[in-house]
Amino acid sequence: MTTKPPLRAAVIGVGHLGRFHARVYSELPDVELRYVVDIDPVRAASAAQQYGGEPLTDHREILDDVDIASVVTPTHTHHPIARDLLDAGASILLEKPMTMTVWEADDLIQIARNRKAALQIGHIERFNPAYRAARDLIREPIFIECHRLTSYAFRGTDVSVVLDLMIHDLDLILDFVFHYPPPSIEAVGVAVLSGNTDLANARLHFPGPGGRTECIANLTASRVSPSPMRRLRVFQRDLYVSMDFLQKKVYVFRKKDGIDPARLDPQQLANLSGLSGDLALGQLMDIREMSVAGTDALKDELSAFVAAVRNGSPPPVTGEHGRRALATAVEIDREIQRFLTARFGEQGPGPARGERE
Ligand code: NAD
């Protein structure tokens, strides 16, 4: 039996998130972390010291010496770096949002196809154990509510909060309502600290046959919030699922068998109305907390990427998946711009001029 040599790996960009990629590659069997690359030589050297690999400052030096690479640089650099690597035949894990524009995304998908290289996009919430536990319960959602709020981190601000944070929830929603045509969109947003949209709300109407709205998704994302939250709730006719990605908890609510609120007798209702909200609800609904395995989502994500490269199978989050989330995010940003222009004139999404001057 012949054993294959380990995959030669690199991480491009070892800032906040890239260091974690380097750690995981250094721990994965079957992978040799060969390079850590950052235009900041101090960061490259520090990552190399901690996780191994040769520190470099220019990804173009490694093109003929890697099989796989994670691209974990600011979004505006994704397209040129990913293009160089794919062109050289390397498979890549490209962080989200995959690119700044849909044109750039299409370009990378095409190159990956031509070079038969794997292109996986870093939509890590697909590997969040709470999503994995709940995914199979989601069948015909009618209403979806997402909240993704963080404090201001001074990173990711080369793009709006829609491309930075909301895109995680867009990817999840499009994972389970993929069969619908593109939604119509209403959106509002405001720039608070970054000069780019920092707080946004979007309402997506997914049309069914005949153009009727079949499902509505309401998404709020903020990177200027004092308290973090990453929650997605799905309402269906038969049940309601609440996923908390931060706490890694899932609750499922179902109406109890035989309960018909229209037929509850007055004495039953009088008894229930004397109970506290939770207890009363418990009489009418089955409320179950699902067990959620405590896994390392980044390790699962990179292991799935390595397995796809090894087996020559499509990665779990493809370039096409990244592209559809990006296309929706770009459209939301356009809607925000349209809203602000209609509301305030040509000044765009920045702080209201009258308030600043
Ligand atoms: P960061 O600013 O902490 O790190 C980026 C690093 O890239 C820096 O060290 C910088 O010096 C380096 N860099 C910039 N240009 C480079 C180039 N041309 N070549 C090599 N290195 C270069 O940013 P971050 O928070 O780590 O985010 C990086 C990427 O990861 C972004 O695309 C962001 O959207 C994404 N991200 C994804 C998640 C997730 O949940 N999947 C979370 C955070 C960030």
Image (cartoon, helix red, strand yellow):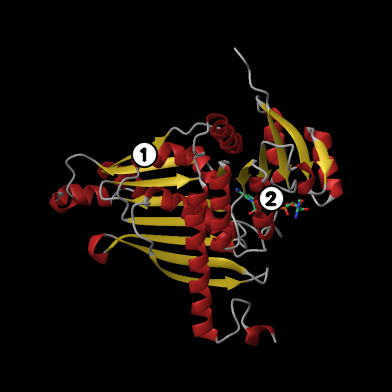
Q: Residue furthest top?
A: 1
Q: Is residue 213 above or below residue 269?
A: below
Distance from disc 1 to disc 2, alpha carbons, whole Å, reads 38 Å
Which of the 4 quarters of the picture holds residue 192?
Answer: bottom right
The image position of residue 256, as x and y in percent, is: 23, 41
Amino acid type assigned to the residue bearing label 2 in the image: Asp
Task: State the mark number for residue 136.
Answer: 1
- Does the image show residue 123? no
Q: Nearer the viewer, residue 178 or 253?
A: 178
Which residue does the image show at 74% across and 48% down from the upper left?
Answer: 13
Left or right of residue 214, residue 324 in this image:
right
Label 2 Cα neighbours within 10 Å, binned few <14 / some 14-19 / many ≥20:
some
Label 1 Cα neighbours within 10 Å, binned few <14 / some 14-19 / many ≥20:
few
Task: State the mark number for residue 84.
Answer: 2
Looking at the rendered image, the quarter that the N terminus falls into is: top right
The image position of residue 246, as x and y in percent, is: 55, 45
Looking at the rendered image, the quarter that the C terminus falls into is: bottom right
Which of the 4 quarters of the picture holds residue 116?
Answer: top right
Which residue does the image show at 40% across and 64% down from the upper left?
Answer: 204
The image position of residue 319, as x and y in percent, is: 52, 49
Amino acid type assigned to the residue bearing label 1 in the image: Asp
- Does the image show residue 12? yes
Q: Is residue 73 above or below residue 137?
A: below
Left or right of residue 24, residue 270 in this image:
left
